[in-house]
Image (tube, grey):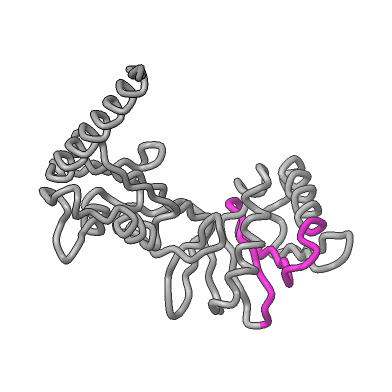
Amino acid sequence: MKVNWNIIKALFLLVLVGFLFSFSHRKNAEKKVRDILVEFDAGENLFMNYEMVNKLLIQKGKTVKNERLSTLDLHLLESKVQSHPMVENAAIFLTVDGLLKSKVKQREPIARVISKTNNYYIDEQAKKMPLSLNHSARVVLVSGNIMDEDNAQIYQLVKKIVSNDFLKKQIIGIRKMTNNEFVLKARVGDQKIELGKIENLNKKFMNLESFLKKASIDKTLEDYSHINLKYDNQVVCTKK
């Protein structure tokens, strides 16, 4: 009977590869985490610092540094980092030389809410975000009679402002009144800009932008104490 050496060679190579893979796997499993590297998205660690992330990288009550690779639960560690209210997204992985890397994307605030009971940010995804001891974001300030259920309206209002290149430079503050209407504060002047309820925002802001641009050219903005946007197709002003 003729021996098929090609089949024998193939089987031998298969067994050899399996042995080498098993040996390499056991050897790597015995390796330990030599160090932890934290990277922030775009290199910005504004609201969190490296120590804050490192404190989240714990397993069974202790840091994973010097722990064997075989004992790590990367999914658990990733979930812990992602659960932090300042984190939008995180990825945890191991390098071949035993380095545990954590890539973190922080939330991006668009407004800072100052209420009687709590102070916090609202981020780009309309979620609440705690204030940070490390950094204070320069965003629109929102104050007044604010409840948690108002956050959706506040988000809608602020997004309209920051998406407009002209208005985001002009409007620096928002105040919610007890009648559920809103008053805006401009960067220049001390006028009350009465927005009213969160409705017809496109029309109201188009009217406001046109008025502010014209008043700036005419240098008449300081003549008014109130700017009312609640009426259809017009801006009603009260002189000082």
| Residue positioned 59% across, 77% down in the render | 149
Q: Considering only vertical position in the picture, is 15 above or below 101?
A: above
Residue 181 is inside the magenta segment = yes
Residue 43 is situated, as x and y percent measured from the top left of the image, at: 36, 37
- Residue 131: image quadrant is bottom left
Residue 55 vertical placement versus 4 (above, below)? below
Question: In terms of image quadrants, where is residue 18?
Answer: top left
Q: Which residues are magenta?
A: 179-204
x%, y% of residue 55?
A: 21, 58
Residue 159: x %, y % from top left? 63, 55
Q: Residue at image x 36%, y 61%?
A: 84
Name the residue at the front extreme: 1
Name the image quarter holding the N terminus. top left
Q: Is 62 left or right of 110, judged from the image as shown?
A: left
Between residue 101 and residue 152, name the one nearer to us: 101
Q: Residue furthest right?
A: 233
The one nearer the camera, 80 or 197, is: 80
Question: Which x, y percent locates residue 83?
Answer: 38, 63
Number of on-image labels: 0
147 drawn magenta: no
> Which of the two residues, 65 or 41, is positioned nearer the viewer here?
65
Depth check: 71 or 4 in front? 4
State left or right for residue 174 relative to residue 19: right
Give the residue displayed 81% in from the left and 54% down from the top.
207
- In this rendering, the answer to whether 15 lies above or below 133 is above
In the picture, measured across the screen, residue 174 lies left or right of residue 139, that is: right
| On-image quarter of the C terminus | bottom right
Q: Residue at x 31, y 60 (%)?
A: 76
